[in-house]
Amino acid sequence: MIRAARPGDAAEIAGIWNRVIRETVATFTTLEKTEADLARAIGNGLPFLVAEEGGAVAGFVTAFQFRGGPGYAHTFEHSIHVADGARGRGLGRALMAEVEAALRAQGAHSLFAGVSGENTDGVAFHAAIGYREVARLPQVGWKFGRWHDLVLMQKIL
């Protein structure tokens, strides 16, 4: 089931997100998410959705303005992560369909995915749901002692 995230989901969301931060280059940050920060982000007026299975959070998606300023008010970026044991069951697709619909309802025009060049599954996932690669930024992310490319993928909503 896809539903709006609640502040009480923050611990489970942090568990999923922080594993990605610690162990992968799916995100270039090394700063782990705190429950307090996530609880504040939930309900900030922008979509923050979870996939729930068996009463537990199995994945999430959140969206935020692509860049600051009023000129970018209709352009967003998203973060999506599905727990390791929940992949391959369509949760990512369902989360993306819901966040795209929520953003459209708020007047969004364009949605970006910033995907690590090494994350070929992430690139393939976004391509399969209608995103196209619009830029590849070489060596812009530093993590695990090496440089990483960032692939920008876009979907016009």
Image (cartoon, rainbow, N blue to C red):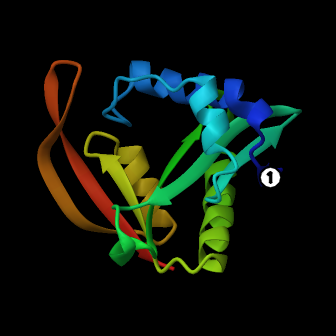
Is 86 above or below relative to 44? above
Name which residue lies at 65% across and 31% down.
13
Q: Is residue 101 visible?
A: yes
Q: Residue at x 67, y 44 (%)?
A: 42
Q: Residue furthest right?
A: 54
Residue at which label 1 appears: 3
Residue 87 visible to an observer of this rendering: no
Q: Is residue 99 above or below residue 4?
A: below
Classify 97 as above or below 90: below
Q: Position of residue 66 (x, y in %)?
A: 38, 62
Which residue is pictured at 34% across the width and 63% down the height? 153
Residue sitting nearer the eye, 4 or 42: 42
**Residue reaching furthest to the front:** 69
125 displayed left or right of 37: left
Position of residue 98 measured from the top left corner of the image (x, y, whole percent)? 69, 64
Residue at disc 1, secondary structure: strand
Task: Give the image quarter of residue 5.
Answer: top right
Q: Quadrant of residue 131?
A: bottom left
Give residue 146's quadrant in the image.
top left
Pointer 1: residues within 10 angstroms few (<14), some, or many (20+)? few
Residue drawn at (34%, 53%) of the image: 114
Pick the residue in front: 71 or 56.
Answer: 71
Residue 108's spot in the image, x, y percent? 52, 77
